[in-house]
Amino acid sequence: MVSAVIVAGGKGERMGYDIPKQYINIKGREILAITLDAFESCESIDEIILVVPESYIDFCLKNIVEKYCFKKVKKVVKGGLSRQESVYNGLLNCNPHCEVVVIHDGVRPFIQENIIQKSIEGAKKFGACAVGVYVKDTIKVVDDEKFIVSTLKRDELISIQTPQTFKYDLILKSHEYAKQNNITATDDCALSEGYGCKVKIIEGDYFNIKITTREDIIIARAIYDSLLKNFKEEQNENWSRL
Ligand SMILES: Nc1ccn([C@@H]2O[C@H](COP(=O)(O)OP(=O)(O)OP(=O)(O)O)[C@@H](O)[C@H]2O)c(=O)n1
Ligand SMILES: C[C@](O)(CO)[C@H](O)COP(=O)(O)O
């Protein structure tokens, strides 16, 4: 059984709106709903555990899960103070038969189904698999006064995204190990690396952005338009081929 833990338990402080950024509307659909669409329609996903701030559980059930009839969402559970705590609570709420778990940010709405699928295959084969893209800029290390200390080798640098997909027991143990040893990290790969696990990277997609600050909303609207346009063109092509 494959579970998806979608973490949407953050407050979106860097976005600075009154509502958490996962509920911002992009061309008529909430960011979180667009993210859930991809997982709902991915055949390999058996259940979705949605993690949201406690005060948003009822709101989310009514205005996202029921409104769009997301049938695979089996539980909406409370998040924690950090992303790490939110993921951990998501993991604890997965079905007991879960073998592989796909962990994804609720604010990465442009994830493509084929990438979710490849990450599941990667986790089955390697135990841990994450999606990433090569960085396009040259990356510098700076000191406290912002003078350059060194230049990193770009062909060794990956910008890590989600999904990050794992054999369930492995990621649960990685989180528990981190908790016992007061280890914190901004992603789940780092926790499984800390537990001694090798994580395989698969090529992601530059469109799979994390909506973090206000300029990302402008970019997200453009991506949504472009993906929708491609989808319509593909449908027209299929239609004309019939
Ligand atoms: N306590 C938290 C913090 C973050 N997240 C989720 O983790 C993902 C990536 O986090 P980030 O972009 O940092 O979101 P926020 O924490 O909401 O943003 P900010 O740091 O600006 O407040 C988001 O889907 C977010 O909702 C979570 O589930 N629980
Ligand atoms: C998990 C993640 O999206 C991978 O890029 C990222 O680490 C989340 O970081 P944030 O600090 O919650 O923005």
Image (cartoon, helix red, strand yellow):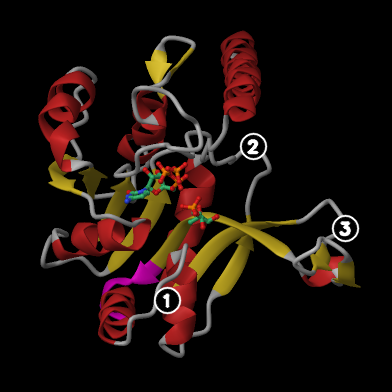
Residue 218, placed above or below residue 240: below
The residue singled out by tag 3 in the image is 138
Badge 2 amino acid: Phe
Instruction: Name the outermost residue toward the bottom.
Output: 196
Disc 3 or 1, which lies upstream in sequence?
3
Q: Secondary structure at mark 2?
A: loop
Q: Report crowding for label 1: few under 14, some 14 to 19, many 20 or more residues within 10 A (C-alpha).
A: many
Q: Is residue 43 left or right of residue 78?
A: right
Q: Could you say which is closer to the camera, residue 177 or residue 92?
A: 177
Determine the residue positioned at 47% across, 63% down: 186
Q: Quadrant of residue 99?
A: bottom left
Q: Is residue 229 left or right of residue 7?
A: right
In the rendered structure, which segment of residues is drawn in magenta? 166-170
Q: Quadrant of the C terminus?
A: top right
Q: Is residue 79 left or right of residue 156?
A: left
Disc 1 or 2, which lies upstream in sequence?
1
Residue 18, placed above or below residue 134: above
Check residue 191 in the rendering and tell me which mark sits there, or answer none: 1
**Residue 68 point in image, percent of width and height:** 24, 20
Disc 2 or 3, which lies upstream in sequence?
3
Check residue 207 in the rendering and tell me which mark sits there, or answer none: 2
Residue 53 appears in view = yes
**Residue 115 point in image, percent of width and height:** 53, 50
Determine the residue positioned at 63% across, 20% down: 218
Badge 3 amino acid: Thr
